[in-house]
Amino acid sequence: MAKEEYFLYPTDVESFGFDWGRLALTVAPEVNGAERFSGGVVDLPSGEGHTRHNHPGAEEIIFVVSGEGEQMVEDENGDPVTQRVGPGCTIYVPESRFHSTRNTGPGPMQLFVVYSPAGPERALRDLPDFRLIPPGT
């Protein structure tokens, strides 16, 4: 089990870097021993975002910390529901639903995401544009 870390900033942990932005996983079994969920801070530069994808077997919460964007979540029929989102908006992505996020604002967009159960973020390491960014950078 990982050491219990109660207070972490995104710069305290390794980040997952991608062509579209980065994820600093600040809560996860391997980071601080969290058992039932994982989460972290996502940074999206202006004009960037991640394409339609899902997390099989997991629900997701996305909280917009800053910036503006467009969020898509597919409904129970598989039809896309898209809405402009900004600071303070909470997005719920039901289990295994396809979704996407794009920063449409003039500046950076920051999100806090939570996956339940923990684990979907592990698959991100297999993406072709994945790179590990050391803490502090």
Image (tube, helix red, strand yellow):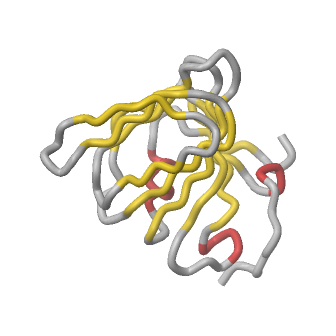
Please state the total of marks drawn on the protein image.
Answer: 0
Q: Residue at x 45, y 40 (%)?
A: 127
Q: Residue furthest left?
A: 77
- The answer to which image quadrant residue 38 occupies is bottom right
Q: Is 129 in front, or is 60?
A: 60
Instruction: Give above or below for 85 relative to 75.
Output: above
- The answer to which image quadrant residue 3 occupies is bottom right
Please give left or right for residue 137 compared with residue 68 in the image: right
Q: Residue at x 62, y 45 (%)?
A: 88
Q: Where does residue 4 sit, x and y in percent of width and height? A: 76, 81
Q: Residue at x 66, y 49 (%)?
A: 41
- The answer to which image quadrant residue 39 occupies is bottom right
Q: Residue furthest bottom?
A: 1
Which quadrant of the rendered structure holds the C terminus? top right
Q: Is 18 in front, or is 46?
A: 46
Q: Residue at x 65, y 79 (%)?
A: 33
Which quadrant of the rendered structure holds the N terminus? bottom right
Q: Where does residue 23 sit, x and y in percent of width and height? A: 63, 45
Q: Is 137 in front, or is 96?
A: 96
Q: Where does residue 102 sit, x and y in percent of width and height? A: 49, 27
Q: Residue furthest right?
A: 136
